Amino acid sequence: MMEETKNPTPEEEVTEEVSTEEEVETAEAEAEEEMTKEDRKEAKKKAKADKKGDALKEKIAELEDKTMRQLAEFENFRNRTEKEKQAMFETGARSVIEKLLPVVDNFERGLATVPEEEKDTPFVDGMNKIYKQLMTELDNMGVKPIEAVGKEFDPNLHNAVMQVESEEFESGIVAQELQKGYTYRDTVVRHSMVAVVQ
């Protein structure tokens, strides 16, 4: 006997369609939930990466700042060291100049005592040349004699050791220089010892 194929009734078709739609919706929901989980994972990964990136940027900025500070400190150290070295050189130079000035004084005193008739002798001529060479080298170093006679008394440059009367100069003017004073690069190494008009 032959079996009859049963055609589904419209109600059964609707039920089948509904169940298929429900399955599709469920599958879509599951897929959406699965995608949402993946998206969340991706978002978490991205957030972690952003946090990591921000932390790295912060660390880089901190290290750059630290490096800049160290460079500035080193530059300050180098400038300070250069100034100290220059000051030590100046102090050393002043010390040597102060020791040479009595030698210059003795040359001047010795040459001043040479009698007029002996001034053309080779010995005196040689001593004059040595004195001029010494003075030239001091001048090249920046050592200059302080002008005193005929100038107004200046306590920054002159040391008054006596007062004198003079018809040639007014009161407060240096009339006589007893010992030459010298400056080194515009600072006084030795004050001039002078006699000032009353």
Image (tube, rainbow, N blue to C red):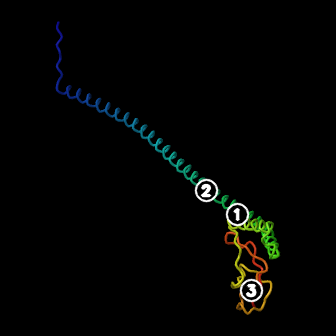
Q: Amino acid at mark 3?
A: Ala
Mark 3 = which residue? 175
Give the position of the C terminus as an image quadrant. bottom right
On the image, which quarter does residue 22 sit in? Answer: top left
Mark 1 = which residue? 87
Q: Amino acid at mark 1?
A: Ala
State the image coordinates of residue 177 (x, y, percent, origin top left): 76, 81
> Of tags 3 and 1, which is closer to the observer?
3
Find numbered disc 2 in the image and state the secondary structure of the residue it sits on.
Answer: helix
Crowding at mark 1 (Cα within 10 Å: few <14, some 14-19, many 20+): few
Closer to the chain start, of discs 3 and 2, is: 2
Mark 2 = which residue? 75
The structure residue drawn at horizontal position 45% and vertical position 40%, both measured from the top left corner, is: 44
Q: Residue furthest top?
A: 1
State the image coordinates of residue 189 (x, y, percent, origin top left): 74, 71
On the image, which quarter does residue 178 sit in? Answer: bottom right
State the image coordinates of residue 5 (x, y, percent, origin top left): 17, 15
Q: Amino acid at mark 2?
A: Glu
Alpha carbon distance from label 3 to label 2: 52 Å
Nearer to the camera, 149 or 124: 124
Closer to the chain start, of discs 3 and 1, is: 1
Alpha carbon distance from label 1 to label 2: 18 Å
